[in-house]
Image (cartoon, grey):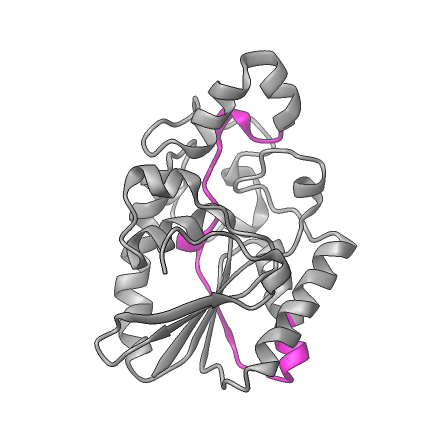
Amino acid sequence: MNYLILVRHGQSKWNLEKRFTGWVDVDLTENGKLEAKKAGSLIKKKNILIDLYYSSLQLRANNTLKIIQKVLNDKKKIVKAWQINERHYGILTGLNKVEMSQKIGEDKVYEFRRSWEIKPDPLSKESPYHPINIDVYKNVPKKNIPDTESLKDTYERVIKFYNEQIKNQLKNKNVLISAHGNSLRALCKYLFQLDNNQISRLEIPTGNPLMIELNDRLEIKNCEYLDKERAKDLLVF
């Protein structure tokens, strides 16, 4: 049996401020760092050797993983990939979710956040929040940098990367991925074969490792959130 462990980064500064973050590169809050430390402790208790570590290019996911590795006393190289970045929220980027709910209605904001194919209007390339103006993405081909994304768009890039770079590794290795709410929702949709209605209800808690046990055919044998007090309904199992 091998394991795939999925960790949504700990609370970020814009999580705390209830802002649409997307590809903006914000760091963890102090609480987020504590969540990452606890995630590392919970993984350590399982006594599982992690063979490969993956993270998005984004600081909040990178630093979550660095804290986890420190707890595990593991200095293996982290593979960083833009393909598992958070979903790009287009023109909503940087805006406050509560204020937007008051302005355009809770149903419309929920539609933007949770629908499968609907995407916000594109973010202007002149915006300082646009990825082409953020240094960490300078080596990402511009053709791959979005102005806005739906969850479907996010799903397509995440699953392509998973199938090409990660899936075969799971045949004989344990893998940990540190990423984001929507990129991990996309991966869970694929792994658990969720339909479009189910994925709209799936919530991934920050800093709570989801440990997935796989058999030799890479079928899911079991899964669990390691922090039981903050576990969410997986809609499966």
Q: Is residue 220 magenta?
A: no
> As displayed, is residue 151 above or below residue 76?
above
> Is 118 or 237 nearer to us in this picture?
237
Name which residue lies at 52% across and 77% down.
Answer: 77
> Is 79 or 35 nearer to us in this picture?
35
Q: Is residue 87 magenta?
A: yes
Q: Is residue 72 visible?
A: yes
Position of the C terminus by quadrant: bottom left
Question: Position of 229 compared to 130: left or right?
Answer: right
Position of the N terminus by quadrant: bottom left
**Residue 215, image x and y in percent?**
28, 78
**Residue 229, image x and y in percent?**
63, 60
**Residue 136, image x and y in percent?**
56, 51
Direction left: furthest residue: 217
Question: Position of 94 compared to 78: left or right?
Answer: right
Which quadrant of the structure image shows residue 104?
top right
Name which residue lies at 33% across and 51% down.
Answer: 189
> Is 140 or 166 nearer to us in this picture?
166
**Residue 50, image x and y in percent?**
48, 81
Question: Position of 35 compared to 146: left or right?
Answer: right
Q: Is residue 124 visible?
A: no
Direction right: furthest residue: 30
Q: What is the total number of numbered labels drawn onto the structure image?
A: 0
Name which residue lies at 67% across and 40% down.
Answer: 14
Name which residue lies at 67% across and 78% down.
Answer: 71
Question: Position of 129 compared to 144: left or right?
Answer: right
Which span is picked out in magenta? 68-94
Direction top: furthest residue: 103
Which quadrant of the structure image shows residue 118?
top left
